[in-house]
Amino acid sequence: MAIDLSMKILIVDDFSTMRRIIKNILKQIGFANIDEAENGEIALSKIIDGDYDFVISDWNMPEMSGIELLKKVRTSETVKDLPFLMVTAESKKENVIEAVKAGVNNYIVKPFTAEVLQEKISKIFPD
Amino acid sequence: MDDSMQEIVDDFIQEALELLESLNENFIELEKQPDNKDILNTIFRAAHTIKGSAGFLGFQNIIELAHSAENILNKLRQGEMVLTAEMTDYLLKTMDTLKAMIITISETGTEGNPPIDNTKLIKKLNEMSEGSDIETPSPKEESSLSEGEGGGIDPACSEGQHARLADGSDSGKKKTKNLGDILLEDNLISKEELEQIYREKEEEERGRKGSEEKPKAESVDIELPPVTKAEATVEECRNKPSPVSKPLPVVPQKLAPVHMSEIKETTVRVGIERLDNVMNLVGELVLARNRLFNISSKLESKYADDDLSSVLAQVVANLSLVTTDLQLAVMKTRMQPVKKVFSKFPRMVRDLSRELDKDIDLQIFGEETELDKSVIEEIGDPLVHLIRNSVDHGIEDKEGRIKNGKPERGTIKLVAEHEGNYIIISVTDDGGGIDANIIKRKAVEKGVIDEKTAISLSDKDALNLIFTPGFSTKDEATEISGRGVGMDVVKTNIQKLNGIIEIESKPGRGSDIILKLPLTVAIIQTLIVGVEGQVFAIPLNSIVETLRIKESTIQTIDKHEVINLRESVLSLLRLGNEFEIYENADKGFSSYTDKEIYVVVVALAEKKVGIAVDNLYGQEEVVIKSLGDYELGYKGISGATITGDGKVVLIIDVASMIEAVKIK
C-alpha cells in the first residue's frame, strides 16, 4: 500500500522526547515534511493556518487533551476532515469507543515500531 | 546506538528529570489538598509520559516502576482510592528511584540492573493499589481491543461499508477511513457495536444541544439492543452518515480566537556548552575592547590634532557601548530563576519534619528571581545546609514550641530578592534561635578563642564564630541547640561566589541567615592597584573605601600594623609583604616615613581589613580567567585577567586576605 510520503504531518505531544521519537519513526518510514506542536492550543492554531495533511496527536496532554483538540478540529469549517491519528498508552474499550465517537481516524498504542505506524497510517489512506 | 537515538535518549534524560523535579512541588501541594484532581492528574500524566517514552527507548525497569505508580495514581485521580501519607511516601520514593534510574542511564548509557529495593517498591505500590478493590480485575485485560478479538463481522454490512467508502463521502479531499471503518474492517468490533456507538454519539449530541442540564452519557453499554434483522442492518449501514463528513452540531466551545494563530513556539533549547562558549567569547571581546579603549585614548592625547584619532575614539566608544549591551544580553541568557533550586526544598522540609515529628511550614517568596546559572549551581548545597539546620536545630519540637508559647507549627521563610547588582537570599525561622553566650563558651572550650577574647566579643561577632572551621561537629551543634553543621563549608562556598553571609539571631525568637550573592561570577568590576610596579586587581564589590595616609600614621599593636580609622582600629596588610614583592621584607616595619601610601579598605561580612598599596590605577571591568592547574601555594589569588593595556593581572581573593590577617 503506497502512502503519500510528501504529506505534511503535525505531531502534537507535550513531551518533547516523544515528539522526537515519533518524528524519528516517521523519517524512518520516509516522511520528510514534519512539524511539531507542544500543546493543543498551538496545534490548533497551526492546523488552522498550516495546510496539514495529517495529524498525529498524543491523547493525554495537560490543558487540552488530544480528544478535545480533535473535537475542535472536527467542528471547524475548513479543517474538519483532517485525518487524525491518536497516540495512546492503552487500548481500553471505553477509550476506543470515545475515540470513534470523536471522529478519530485511527489510534496507535505506545510503544510502536515504524512498521506498525506505517500500517496504521496506510489503513487511514486506502488506495 | 546511532547518533539520532543518542540524541533522543539525552533529550529523554533531561526532560524526564525536569518533569520529576517539578513533581515535588505537586506532591507537597497534594498533601494540603489530597483530593485535588488537577494535581493528581498532573502527577499521573508525568508517570504516564515517562512510561510512554521509556517504552520506545526500551528502558524496562523504568517502564515497570512507572507503570505501578501510574496504576495507583490513576485510581487516586478517579476517586477510587484516598491518598494516605504512606502512599505519598512511597510515591515520592518512586519518583526518587525513577530519577536515580534515569541518572544511571545518563552516566552509563544503559539501564543496567534495577536498584536493589526496586522489586520491593513495585510490590508495595501494587499492594497499595490493589488494596482498595481486590475484586475488580484489571480493566486492561478485561476489555482491551487487541487484534483478532471482537465480534464477528456482518458480511452484508461489510459490503455496504465498502460501497459507502467507494462513493467517496469526503467532499473534495482525499478519501480517508475513520476508526470505526478500520475497527470493523479488522474484525475488532461488530457492526452492531459500531452502530450502537454512533447512535449513542448522536444521542449525546442531541442531548447536549437540547438541554444543557442533561447529564452526559459517558459510558456505553455495548450489549444493548442487538439488531436482529439483516435487512435493517444493511439499511442502517448504508444510511449511516459518515462521521467524518457529517457536520457536527455546534459545540459550546467556540473555535480558536484570532490571536491564537499568532501563538508560536517561543523558546529554543540550547546546550549549556554553547552558552558557555558565547560567554567566553564575549569575555574575550570585553578584554579586547578594554585594550582598544586604552590604545585609543593614548592615541587621542598623542595626536590630539589629528581628525582620525577623534574618529577612532568615537568608533571605540560606540563599540564599547555595544559590547556592554552584548555582555548584558549574554548574561541574561544564562540567568535562571532560583526556583530551580528552591523547588526541592518543600519536599526536603516535608521529609525531614516527618522524620523528626515536627510541624513546619516552609514559605517561599521571590522564586522567580533570576541568577546566573553558575551561581544557581553553587548555592544549592549551602541552602540545603541552612534549611536542614533550621528544621533540625532551629525549629523546636511540638511540645517545646507550645511550652514557649509559640504556635505548634513552626515557620521557615525562604526569600530571594534583588538588591542592585546582588541577590539577597535569606533563610528565616521562628525557632529557638542561638544564644551568643553558649556559642562563646563552646568556642572557648574548643580553643577557637581564648577567655579574654570571649568577654570582649560582641554578640554579633560571637554568632559569626559558627562559621569558623572546626568550631563544631554535628553532635556539638545539636547539644548547643544551635547550628554549626558544616557552616564553615557554607561560608566558603558563598565566598567563592564573591558572596557574603550574615547571621542574626535572637534566643527564643529564631534566626535569620542572609546570603548576598553577585548576579554573575564571570565578569566583575575591580580596582587596579600597584605595588612596586606589580599590578593587582581587587574586586570592587568587597571594597568599602580607599584612603591616602602617611606611613608615619601606622601604629603597631602586638607586632600587627594598624591604622586609626575614624576612631576604630583597622588591621593593615601590606600587599608587598604578603606577596614578597618588597626586596627588603621588613620594609613595612622599619621605615615609617612621610611617604604617602594608599589603603584599600575591604570587607567581608563584618570583617574589615586595610590593604596597603603604592598606587591606585583606577576601576576596570575584568573577565575572570581561572588559573587552571597552577598551584600557587598561596590562597590570596582567585584568578587572573588581562587588562586594557595587555598586562596579565592577578585578582586578589579578599576572603583569604582577611583570613590571613585573622591568623596573624
Image (spheres, coloured by chain):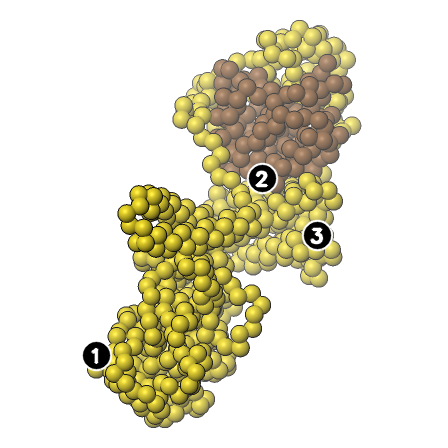
Give the chain of mark 2: A
Label 1 in the same subunit as label 3: yes
Q: Which mark is residue B566?
A: 1
Residue B225 image position (x, y, % from top left): 65, 20
- Kindly report the distance in space between the C-alpha atoms of the residues bearing marks 2 and 3: 20 Å
In the visual, does B411 lie left or right of B547? Answer: right
| Residue at the image position 66 percent from the left and 20 percent from the top | A6
Chain A, chosen colour in render: brown
Q: Nearer the viewer, residue B538 or B582?
A: B582
Which residue lies under the disc numbered 2?
A16
Residue drawn at point x = 51 percent, y = 40 percent: B268
Q: What residue type is labelled 2?
A: Ser
Q: Mark 1 or mark 3, which has the lower sequence index?
A: 3
At label 1, the amino acid type is: Arg
- Residue B114, given in percent of the width and then of the height, sits at 71, 57
As displayed, is residue B163 above or below residue B180? above
Q: Mark 3 points at which residue?
A: B109
Q: Distance between the residues labelled 1 and 3?
A: 64 Å
Neighbours of disc 2 within 10 Å: few (<14), some (14-19), many (20+): some
Q: What element carries label 3?
A: loop
Q: How crowded is mark 1: few (under 14 residues within 10 Å), some or many (20 or more)?
A: few
